[in-house]
């Protein structure tokens, strides 16, 4: 094995005292802990089978065309410049982690609420004209969790198919055919055809371009860089890259077709629909949430996200929580008094936790936070891309379903936030533009922690501790009542139970 790098974690995983969470993960290429040779038999999410989408039968390694490709690869690897090798090092052995990082960066870049117009009105992003102000998308938590879910599930299905073809054709990697090829990444022993790296790049290019259309050129540039790195690293000949690209694009198209009809285009409802939800809550429960900005935003964030098509839960009613306590009731007063007590005596550590988990405008949102944690775990356990894709798929399906169920509760109950219901109460952070009950942070985090605990049981205590801290942070910030957080925690776990049930039957255990 040539040029094997030793895994070096630049940050201590889940350090209890570390409250700086940069987007970029610094890690060196590693040899995979396992290859999951039977990965092609795992159950995909949307594809009917691993072979639903075909790729050409590869040429034999003795054929003139393959030998010519081999010579080109050998020359590219031996002649790679310092800059090219730096790019190889960046993409590393598990490029799925790097593409997830890029997705988080894009979510943060577009997580900007539209400013008011001079006349006090607000305009909404228009997917048909993404460059018009405000630019499309506004990558708020519902948008971000959906983006991560489509990216992760498409990667999983595409890599299941790639693994099936790898072991069906079983064409050895180029460096096994010609031992004199200079490789710059670990020689993990995977069959070469199709290139798993090319599959990852193709899926990422298709899904992220659809989700962030104004970043089309940037995403294409990163994909081209990734494709080239496979050549410079001495890992894949051109036909392997071409087959992976074709497979990845075709699988991504299946998922983007689902996305067209999942209901997201109607989630940002017009004002008459939004007002009808508010009126219904007032009539049924005797309360309503109001936006307190000046000028007030006429519509909250995605009032109908609760009607978007979920992945694993049967429907939102199956996980809808019980009604919250009525404002002014004894239970309400208890939690309201706790909020005021915390606000009056906030400690530096509580403020630090509130800020760490704020995940507001300009950040990659709570779903991105948990994707970052998942990436750290993948590095810790030296996972191959297929195994990592499985984690990203189930994590993000659970998180999106948690978001759908949470937003259903938010606009079904339309519960006022503490800053509205408690006279004179102030938060230490901005006030989110949607109702209070249940807590999005709590629901997202409980679902994410449950899935990660299932996949990485040795790290369950830490995952659950992070989820508890995320929920508590919203109380410290004055954003949520304790019952918002506690019921959100229960709701997130209920959502995750459906996702875990699917995971237990996919053949990868």
Image (cartoon, rainbow, N blue to C red):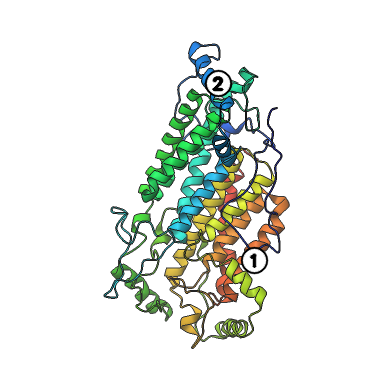
Image quarter where the C terminus lies is: top right
Element on which disc 1 rests: helix
The residue drawn where x is 50% and y is 83% is 327
Q: CA separation, marks 2 and 1?
A: 47 Å
- The answer to which of marks 2 and 1 sits earlier in the sequence is 2
* Looking at the image, residue 149 lies above or below residue 352: above
Residue 311 seen: no
* Looking at the image, residue 411 lies above or below residue 199: below
Residue 194 seen: yes
Q: Residue 136 is drawn in which quadrant? A: bottom left
Q: Give the image location of residue 429, x and y in percent.
A: 52, 74
Q: Give the image location of residue 13, x and y in percent.
A: 69, 54
Q: Is residue 6 left or right of residue 143?
A: right
Disc 1 residue crowd, few under 14, some 14–19, many 20+, Cα 10 Å: some
Q: Give the image location of residue 395, x and y in percent.
A: 56, 51
Residue underneath mark 1:
468
Of 69 and 86, nearer the camera is 86
Q: Which mark is residue 169?
A: 2
Image quarter where the N terminus lies is: top right
Disc 2 residue crowd, few under 14, some 14–19, many 20+, Cα 10 Å: some
């Amino acid at each position: 094995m040539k040029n094997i790098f030793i895994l070096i974690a630049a940050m201590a995983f889940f350090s209890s005292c570390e409250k700086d969470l940069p987007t970029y993960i610094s890690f060196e290429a590693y040899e995979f802990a396992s290859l999951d040779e039977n990965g092609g038999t795992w159950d995909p999410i949307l594809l009917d089978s691993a072979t639903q989408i075909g790729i050409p039968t590869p040429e034999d390694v003795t054929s003139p065309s393959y030998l010519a490709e081999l010579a080109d690869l050998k020359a590219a690897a031996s002649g790679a410049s310092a800059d090219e090798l730096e790019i190889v090092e960046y993409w590393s052995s598990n490029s799925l982690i790097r593409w997830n990082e890029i997705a988080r960066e894009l979510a943060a870049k577009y997580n900007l609420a539209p400013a008011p117009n001079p006349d006090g009105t607000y305009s909404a992003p228009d997917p048909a004209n993404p460059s018009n102000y405000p630019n499309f998308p506004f990558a708020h938590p519902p948008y971000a969790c959906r983006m991560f879910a489509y990216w992760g599930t498409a990667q999983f299905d595409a890599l299941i198919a790639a693994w099936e073809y790898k072991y069906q054709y079983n064409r050895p990697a180029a460096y096994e055919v010609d031992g004199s090829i200079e490789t710059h990444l670990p020689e993990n022993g995977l069959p070469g055809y199709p290139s798993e790296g090319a599959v990852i790049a193709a899926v990422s290019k298709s899904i992220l371009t659809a989700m962030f259309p104004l970043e089309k050129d940037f995403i294409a540039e990163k994909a081209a860089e990734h494709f080239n790195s496979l050549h410079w690293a001495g890992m894949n000949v051109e036909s392997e890259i071409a087959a992976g690209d074709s497979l990845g694009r075709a699988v991504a198209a299946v998922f983007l077709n689902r996305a067209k009809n999942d209901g997201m285009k109607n989630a940002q409802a017009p004002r008459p629909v939004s007002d009808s939800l508010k009126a219904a809550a007032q009539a049924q429960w005797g309360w309503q949430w109001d936006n307190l900005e000046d000028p007030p935003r006429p519509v909250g964030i995605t009032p109908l996200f609760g009607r978007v098509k979920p992945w694993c839960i049967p429907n939102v009613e199956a996980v809808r929580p019980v009604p919250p306590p009525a404002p002014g009731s004894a239970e309400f007063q208890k939690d309201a008094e706790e909020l005021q007590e915390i606000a009056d005596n906030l400690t530096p550590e509580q403020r630090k936790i509130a800020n760490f988990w704020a995940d507001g405008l300009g950040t990659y949102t709570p779903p991105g936070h948990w994707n970052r944690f998942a990436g750290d775990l993948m590095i810790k356990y030296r996972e191959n891309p297929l195994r990592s894709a499985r984690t990203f798929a189930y994590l993000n399906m659970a998180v999106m379903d948690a978001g759908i169920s949470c937003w259903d509760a938010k606009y079904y109950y339309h519960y006022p936030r503490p800053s509205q219901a408690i006279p004179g109460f102030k938060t230490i952070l901005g006030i989110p533009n949607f109702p209070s009950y249940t807590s999005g942070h709590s629901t997202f985090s409980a679902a994410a922690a449950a899935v990660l605990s299932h996949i990485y049981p040795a790290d369950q205590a830490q995952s659950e501790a992070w989820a508890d801290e995320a929920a508590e942070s919203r109380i410290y910030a004055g954003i949520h009542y304790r019952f918002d957080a506690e019921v959100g925690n229960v709701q997130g776990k209920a959502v995750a139970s459906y996702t875990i049930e699917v995971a237990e039957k996919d053949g990868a255990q």
